[in-house]
Structure formats: structure tokens, C-alpha cells
Image (cartoon, grey):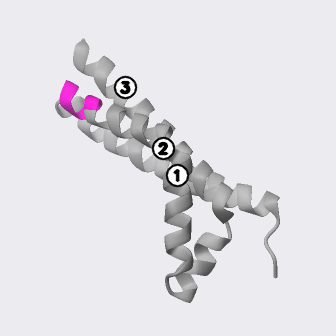
Amino acid sequence: MPVTSVESRHWITAQLLVIAISVAIFVGAVLPSHPGLLGGGFFLAIGTLNISFYKSTGRKFFARTQSSGPFVARFWARNGEKGTQVLFLGIGVILAAAGCVLLIAGAT
């Protein structure tokens, strides 16, 4: 049964939502104890790199998964190459936003 583009977008959105909630919980746990510039800078740098190289990283990652086992290949084929690129872009935005929150909280 082929997957439509709407189902693929829903799948990507669900994955990004889970990642965003996980990062928010992590930031919420770290922020009260010791907000720091180092952690914020780390998240911001990783997020920025992910945003900068999302197309090439997504393409390479998708190609690597298609030569993996059948379960892994089917799992990532659901999103397609463009969907995997969008997923990497979304992860970069989430990490950069978390880094900004930690940097702002650490500066005060």
C-alpha cells in the first residue's frame, strides 16, 4: 500500500513533535538547576550546522538507510528523500531554538 504525501507529512510532523517535546523536557530539567552558556552554545551550534547542511545530510542518510535491512528501509522510505531532508531541517530548528533559550537564560 503506497503512502501518500499527506500521510508522509503527518509522519514527519509526528516525529518532529516527539523530538520537540523531548528537547523541551530536557531543557526544562536543565534550566532550573544550572542554565549555562556552554550547553546553549552547543545546541545552537549543532542546530545551525544541521540547518546549514540539511539537504546533503538528509540525502546521504536516506541513501544509507535504503541499503539497510528491510524494516529500516521501509521505515525511511515512508518519508522519502525530501521528507528526510525536512526532518533534518526541523531537528536543526528545534536544537537551535533550545540553544537560544539556554543562552538567554544563562545570560541573565
* Circles 2 and 1: CB atoms closer than 8 Å: yes
Task: Examine the structure image and report whether residue 60 is included in the region drawn in magenta.
Answer: no
* Label 3, residues with CA under 10 Å away: few <14, some 14-19, many ≥20: some
**Looking at the figure, which quarter contains the N terminus?**
bottom right
Q: Earlier in the sequence, mark 2 or mark 3?
A: 2
39 on left or right of 14: left
Place residue 35 in its image quadrant: top left
Of tags 2 and 3, the one toward the viewer is 2
Q: Position of residue 89 (x, y in %)?
A: 55, 44
87 or 100: which is nearer to us? 87
* Circles 1 and 3: CB atoms closer than 8 Å: no
Q: Residue under circle 3? A: 101
Tell me which amino acid carries mark 2: Phe
From which residue to which does the magenta span run?
35-41
Q: Earlier in the sequence, mark 1 or mark 3?
A: 1
Tell me which amino acid carries mark 3: Val
Tell me which amino acid carries mark 1: Ser
Report the predominant secondary structure element of the magenta stretch.
helix
